[in-house]
Image (cartoon, rainbow, N blue to C red):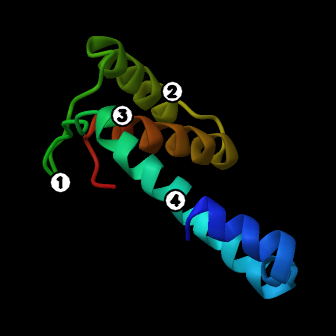
Amino acid sequence: MTAEEQRLHWEQTGYLRNLPAQKSIALAAMQKLGRAKLKELPSKRIPPVQGHAPGVFMGDLRGEDTAQEIAALQRQLDAAPNERQALKLAQRLTRMKRAAGQLAV
């Protein structure tokens, strides 16, 4: 629809003033804006993040510190005075071993 036809239907016939016409104008405007956004999209793309294959262990970033902490927890567990403290230490030890990749998740 040209600008002259729009003016004619708005001013003289009043066709563009009713609700269905207003809805279709709004829908057309949204679609036009959507197409404009799609044209901009390729310029904003970034390369995908390179991950690792499933099941591959990446290793602990702390390295030797974790091994020493695990050994210390194991010693504390062996010397635990009661069952309740032993269970808490065992939980911490299990979490640390899982984080270090020594236990399956």
- Report the residue at 30% width, 19% height from top: 61
Q: CA separation, marks 2 and 3?
A: 54 Å
Quadrant into which the N terminus falls: bottom right
Please name the residue that numbered disc 3 is placed on.
44
**Is residue 55 shown left or right of residue 17?**
left
**Mark 4 against mark 1, which lies toward the viewer?**
4
**Label 2: which residue?**
76
Circle 2 SS class: helix
Residue at 75%, 76% (x, y): give it. Answer: 9
Q: Position of residue 62 (x, y in %)?
A: 33, 15
* Above or below: residue 92 compared with residue 63: below
Callout 1 amino acid = Pro
**Viewer-side residue, 90 vs 38:** 38
Is residue 11 shown above or below 50?
below
**Residue at the spot of label 1:** 54
First of labels 4, 1 by sequence position: 4
Residue 53: % across, % down = 13, 48
* Mark positioned earlier in the residue sequence (4 or 3): 4
Nearer to us of marks 2 and 4 is 4
Question: Residue tagged by mark 4?
Answer: 32
Marks 4/1 in contact by CB < 8 Å: the verdict is no
Left or right side of 22 for 46? left
Q: How many C-alpha atoms fall within 10 Å of the one at disc 2: few (<14), some, or many (≥20)?
A: some
**SS state under label 4:** helix
Badge 1 element: loop
Q: Amino acid at mark 4?
A: Lys
